[in-house]
Image (cartoon, coloured by chain):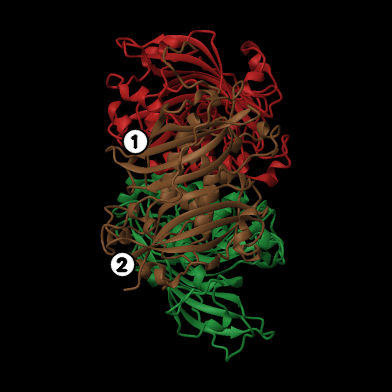
Chain colours: A green, B red, C brown
Amino acid sequence: MNDRAASRPLEGYFFEDYAVGRRFRHATPRTLTAADQALYIALTGARQPVHCSAPLARAMGHRDTPLDDLLVFNVAFGKTVPDISYNAVANLGYADVRFTAPVYPGDTISCASEVIGTKANSNAKSGIVYVRSRAENQDGTEVMSWVRWVMVTARKAAAGIPIVPASPKEVDAARFRAPSQPIPRALTAATASPRLWEDYEAGQVIDHPAGMTVEEADHMSATRLYQNTARVHFDALAAKSTTAGRRLVYGGHVISICRALSYDGLENAFAIAAIHGGTHSNPTFAGDTLYCRTVVLARQEIAGRADVGALRLRMIGAKDVPAAALPPADAGEKHPAVVLDLDYSVLIPRRQ
Amino acid sequence: MNDRAASRPLEGYFFEDYAVGRRFRHATPRTLTAADQALYIALTGARQPVHCSAPLARAMGHRDTPLDDLLVFNVAFGKTVPDISYNAVANLGYADVRFTAPVYPGDTISCASEVIGTKANSNAKSGIVYVRSRAENQDGTEVMSWVRWVMVTARKAAAGIPIVPASPKEVDAARFRAPSQPIPRALTAATASPRLWEDYEAGQVIDHPAGMTVEEADHMSATRLYQNTARVHFDALAAKSTTAGRRLVYGGHVISICRALSYDGLENAFAIAAIHGGTHSNPTFAGDTLYCRTVVLARQEIAGRADVGALRLRMIGAKDVPAAALPPADAGEKHPAVVLDLDYSVLIPRRQ
Amino acid sequence: MNDRAASRPLEGYFFEDYAVGRRFRHATPRTLTAADQALYIALTGARQPVHCSAPLARAMGHRDTPLDDLLVFNVAFGKTVPDISYNAVANLGYADVRFTAPVYPGDTISCASEVIGTKANSNAKSGIVYVRSRAENQDGTEVMSWVRWVMVTARKAAAGIPIVPASPKEVDAARFRAPSQPIPRALTAATASPRLWEDYEAGQVIDHPAGMTVEEADHMSATRLYQNTARVHFDALAAKSTTAGRRLVYGGHVISICRALSYDGLENAFAIAAIHGGTHSNPTFAGDTLYCRTVVLARQEIAGRADVGALRLRMIGAKDVPAAALPPADAGEKHPAVVLDLDYSVLIPRRQ
């Protein structure tokens, strides 16, 4: 091919290609519809009610049924993969993940990223690339923004002065997007759960009872829906020559499954306000059964709102060990069964 | 958690929690769309034409393409699971299943149930709970109603005076919901089949030729789409300590597959009028290949209609034995390969 | 059953049933929606942007987001299966596949076929049936047309004077359906790829880097979505007594996967103009990993258009051998790993 302009090489980018300040406008825009939401439910079992019920969505002040926060995250994330993590060895972490506007059926999402840091590994075979990504809708309104860092293979040798961005430890609650209207009674009527903001307290542990076994077809269908092309998820033949020896489940699918599992016990946590940080502690493979524990880190107030608050939560995803069988929460992160450790906040009604 | 109101416990309800007369308003309402219908087709292979073709649906008097009867049933049923059968040992039977109004894309389904009977088992470890469930749309119109009974584990010891409701042996044909308009020629044009009501007679056996092998990803995706949370379908690890040792396929998925398989030979049976009763005779597992036999039980007239009649049918679902290889129909229910024995009625045009 | 009119037998048609000139109006019409497109993406990973982005589709002159060409092909093809290839031993080839009008969400597709040739095999056990099929929308506008030939089992003995139709070697570029408006900059902005018509030349080989492992649930869900009922794809038990011993992946799913894999390197090839011919050289099974090589056969001009041209391409699909590991292209067709060899043309913007 006679590439006249700088064009994404077929073999993807390598560590050396990521200069701090480099920007990527990711292919291709995606119009999301109610079908993506239905597929999301079929692939994850999500039951968060605002994304399931049009009358409830309208009662919450939405003009239509908004798409699940994590569906939007996964689609937006998927857009960045060909440019950012096609040659990633590992997806190391997330920070400052903000959900800044709802996405409705018919909205078209576009994504762009900027390199904000790089750090070569001492063995020069790879290095860490830090990226700030943004997703916007067809009107140019930002709907999501996040930082992530990935370990990327070097083409020849990773080198350079390390530039490590200062990621915020948390998203300030002042930046949470609260509902435009007072929380209606329809929400707790929909969930049939009386558990509200006041019923949770720091240190509380919720071992969600359900488990979900992941199949190859499930995680591949989810990851294809997100148009995420990272080959580690799809190519069983190529995977044979990797350390794992098999296909990896996309980490965003693990987050989605854990969020779905956490519905029982957090029924009224109707939206994700922010993800403060998170790591995929261990890989997940098809055949693994995922479980979820929630540790309540803090109750957070939303300024000017007596009807709604936030809960800062630690979501611990484990494989093949039921949540109730995990050791006490503080040790959770280091347990070999733990595949996900996410620090995030949800919105939930307050008692009035 | 500090539960101030009576709230569904995370571990679900047990036999002792089901007092006759207790009512449950199930979480959460669900807005169904054309995407649920497309997913239903992808997961079952359904071809009943009124749910596939908008012009045909309009010619049949519908304002939009109605969702498949069994899709609605499965979604409505799924809503009841967290409250009714989360701790069920077995789903014993159905009766008096009526389809009272069509459901269109955009309609929102809510469900409620009332306990109408209980009967402790003699070993006191479990008991049978009888429930009448109803699903309604956003306007409060009932769209479905059914009775089912399940064997539920006791928390401590199942006891009490047995109350066994008198379930009708059949849904009276006078209660079948006939199309609002005369059956148009477009229906038989769509199916390209000349087989009409007059072409079937009591005792006739139709061994549908196709078979469908069930995969774990298929039945789990279907069951997640229905937001049915019964853990027996999803948790391979927990399943290891059950009698079966593995995940069970949701019985409603088996019914849906058999209905799809029965299309060839019943092409013009455009709607399910009622399910009179049914049992899941044996469990279905991933890897099983399902086949379907139909035994015609009776031709039924629809009062005041010369254009449409009903057929009362016995649907026998078998695993790993092709329908034509099953013994004569009367022995069907006791054959070890039989997984489903359903007594139902369909609507079908009459020759004019 | 008392079949009063000629009706499709439950066991399907056999070689003897196909007289040249016989016409079939296939069951059943199908209304396609945005959900079918979302499912298509989830099942194949397709990223061709005109089918993903509503604003881009409108900028290309479409009134709505058109459905993927191959989704339409697979649905239309599926309609023909019960009448044409239910008893097919092998799907031998395609020719003269034309995409004559876009299909939009809400359009209803109907299909008809005419037998245009038959040729008994010398062993009389089977014979080749040649069929011209057409799909039209609810307005009677033809949206697709194609010829295929299949080897069909004989009921008793295949015989008769051979009639082999003269299939065109290619679809004339004058028949390609070009966009109604000049290609907007939005297209290359969406793909973020500068590769245009002028950047490809005859003889060029593109080894697309990605691979996709096929699961049973994936190909069966796709094939069910298309309402294709060929039992070789679904019935693991019946498959045990076949030569392969297992379920076959529907060839149209293989084409769709290869088209999706070929996105990287052909990003701006926004539509399929025609399929000139094609064969499924070897069967594909679940567990196989598919790869795709493209060989550029020719640049084709579109009369009167300086903004858009066509590329005639050879799509070679291989299993378990990465494209770059295949021998030089000319030997490709005979390589035992090759499962697909397709001669087709795509539309792509020209440099202006």
Q: Quick one: which residue is furthest to the bottom in this view? A: A161
Q: Amino acid at mark 1?
A: Tyr
* Quadrant placement of the C terminus of chain C: bottom left
Q: Dividing the picture into quarters, in which one does residue A323 lie?
A: bottom right
Mark 1 residue crowding within 10 angstroms, few (<14) / some (14–19) / many (20+):
many
Percent x, y for residue C324?
A: 62, 66
Of residues A156 and C272, the one nearer the viewer is: C272
Q: In screen coordinates, is B168 left or right of C241?
A: left
Q: Dividing the picture into quarters, in which one does residue B209 lie?
A: top right
Q: Amino acid at mark 2?
A: Asp
Gap between marks 2 and 1 measured at Cα = 44 Å
> Which residue is located at x 30 percent, y 67 percent?
C307
Percent x, y for residue C123?
A: 66, 29
Residue on which disc 2 sits = C307
Residue on which disc 1 sits = B104
Up-down relation of residue B278 to residue A287 (above or below): above
Up-down relation of residue C79 to residue A220 (above or below): above
Of residues A165 and A176, the one nearer the viewer is: A165
